[in-house]
Image (cartoon, grey):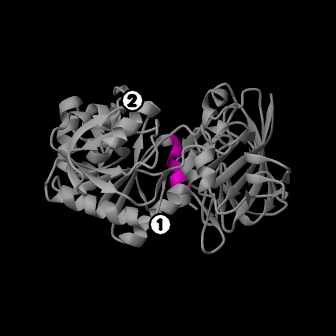
Amino acid sequence: MHIILLSGGSGKRLWPLSNDIRSKQFIKIFKTQTGEYESMVQRMYHQIREVDQDAAVTVATSKTQVSSIHNQLGDKVSVCVESSRRDTFPAIALASAYLHDEKGVPGEEPVVVCPVDPYVEKDYFEALKKLGEIARCGEAKLVFMGMEPTYPSEKYGYIIPEDANTVSRVATFKEKPDARTAEQYIRQGALWNGGVFAYQLKYVLEKAHELIDFRDYQDLAAKYGTLDKISFDYAVAEKEKDSKVMRFQGQWKDLGTWNTLTEAMEETCIGKGMVNQACENVHIVNELDVPVLCMGLKDVVVSASPEGILVSDKEQSSYIKPFVDKIDQQVMFAEKSWGSFRVLDATEESLTIKVTLNPGNKMNYHSHERRDEVWNVISGCGRSIIDGQVRSIKAGDVLDMKAGSRHTVLADTELKIIEIQFGKEISVQDKQKFEFPAL
C-alpha cells in the first residue's frame, strides 16, 4: 500500500505551541505505553506500521517542516518537499509525480491520500487498506472515505452517496454549509469529506498533466512556486463523474482546535501544572520550566510555551486565528533534523539560544557574515570543527566563532549548548553552507 500523508498547515489555531515551523501535528501530547509523549504524526506513522508493516509512506510537506519530520520520524521516511504552500491539488500532483518518477511506482498501483493529523484508531487503517483495494480493482477512478457525521458541522464539506450501501456511487459533493443546511445534508445521508481518498497513480498523473504544463517530477518541482493555489476537491474531485465513497463509522476526530485537542488528552496536565478540586474540564499544556496553577476554573485551556501564553475558554479557543495573525514574533522553538533549539533571550544586538543535539547528529558546516557566536557547552560531549580544525568538546568548554568563520558541531552523546549571537543584523538568512570537511 502506498500512502501519501499530507502534512501542511500554518499552526495558528494551536498557538502558542504551534507556529509556521512547528504545526499542530508535531506537538507531543499523546502518552505512549512507555510513559513518553508522541505527536500526531508519530502516532499516525506508528499506527500505519502496526496495520501494514510494508506500507510505503511518503509525507508531502513544505520545506519548513522537513526538519521536524526527520526529527520525529527519522531520516529513512520518504518526504516530498513543496518549495511553497500551493494547496492540496499541487501537493498531491507533486507527490504522485515523485512516486512515479523518483520511486518507480507503476501507474496501475493504488495510492491512498490522507491528512496526517486526525485522531483515529486501528480500524481507520484497516479501512485505508480496503479503500486502496477498491482503487486497485478499478471500480472507480476516485474512491473516497466518507465519515459518518456525528453533528451538523460547518467545518467540513459533505459527500452525498447515491444509496445507503457501505460502498456507493457519489451523487454529489457539497461545500462547507451553515448548520441548518448541514442538517438537511445529513437527512439526505451525507457523509463528512475528511480529505481521504484513493486512486490508481496514473489517474492523478493524467489530471496533473491536463491542468499543469510539466514534463516530470523534477520539472514540476522547479516550477512549483508558480502554480495556482487550488484544492484537490475543486480541481478534480467535484468534477469527476466516476467516483465512489466508502462509509467509515469508526472514531475519527479532526484535532484542529484546542477544544477538540483537549478531548483526546488522557491527562489533565502535561508539563508542570496543577488544578484544584474546584476546576471542571480544565487542561494545561506547559512547555515552560515554571509551574502553572489553576483554581476554580471551568471549561478552560491553559497553554504556555516560549512563543507565549494562552488562557482561554475552550469554546472560544476556536476563534484564535485572527488574534494570532496580529502577533509578529520570531520563532522561539523548533525541532530540527539534528535536535532542537529554544530562544532564551532576544535583544536588538544579541540572541541567546539553548541548542540540543541528539546523539550521533551534527549541524551543517556553515558561516555567518554579520554576527559573531559564542558556544558554551553545558552537558554532553562531542566534536567541534572551526575553520577545518577538529576539537573534542565537553561540558564547560567555550567556543568562540567570529563572523566569517566556518563551523559546526557533532554530538557523540546528547549535547546541550548555550549559543550567544552578537551582531546588529541577526537574521536566519545570514547563513552560508559548505561541504562538510573530512574528519
The residue tagged 1 is 46
- For the stretch drawn in magenta, the main secondary structure is helix
Q: Is residue 69 magenta?
A: yes
Mark number displayed over residue 309: none
Q: In the figure, 415 relative to 258: above or below?
A: below
Q: Secondary structure at mark 1?
A: helix
Tell me the mark number nearer the camera, choosing from 1 and 2: 1
First in residue order: circle 1 vs circle 2:
1
At a point 24% along the width and 52% down the height, the residue shown is 164
Q: Amino acid at mark 1?
A: His
Question: Is residue 288 rendered to the left or right of residue 256?
Answer: right
Of residues 304 and 419, the one nearer the viewer is 304
Q: Position of residue 72 (x, y in %)?
A: 55, 59
Of residues 15 and 252, the one nearer the viewer is 252
Question: Is residue 411 rendered to the left or right of residue 2?
Answer: right
Name which quarter of the figure residue 156 lies in: top left
Q: Secondary structure at mark 2?
A: helix
Mark number displayed over residue 225: 2
Q: Can the viewer see residue 205? A: yes
Of residues 130 and 345, the one nearer the viewer is 130
Q: Position of residue 137 (x, y in %)?
A: 14, 59
The local crowd at label 1, few if under 14, some if 14 to 19, many if 20 or more residues have their Cα within 10 Å, is: some
Q: Position of residue 436 (x, y in %)?
A: 54, 52
Q: Amino acid at mark 2?
A: Gly
The local crowd at label 2, few if under 14, some if 14 to 19, many if 20 or more residues have their Cα within 10 Å, is: some
Spatial separation of the CA atoms under disc 1 and disc 2: 32 Å
- Quadrant where the N terminus sits is bottom left
Q: Position of residue 283 (x, y in %)?
A: 72, 53
- Quadrant where the C terminus sits is bottom right
The magenta-colored residue range is 64-71
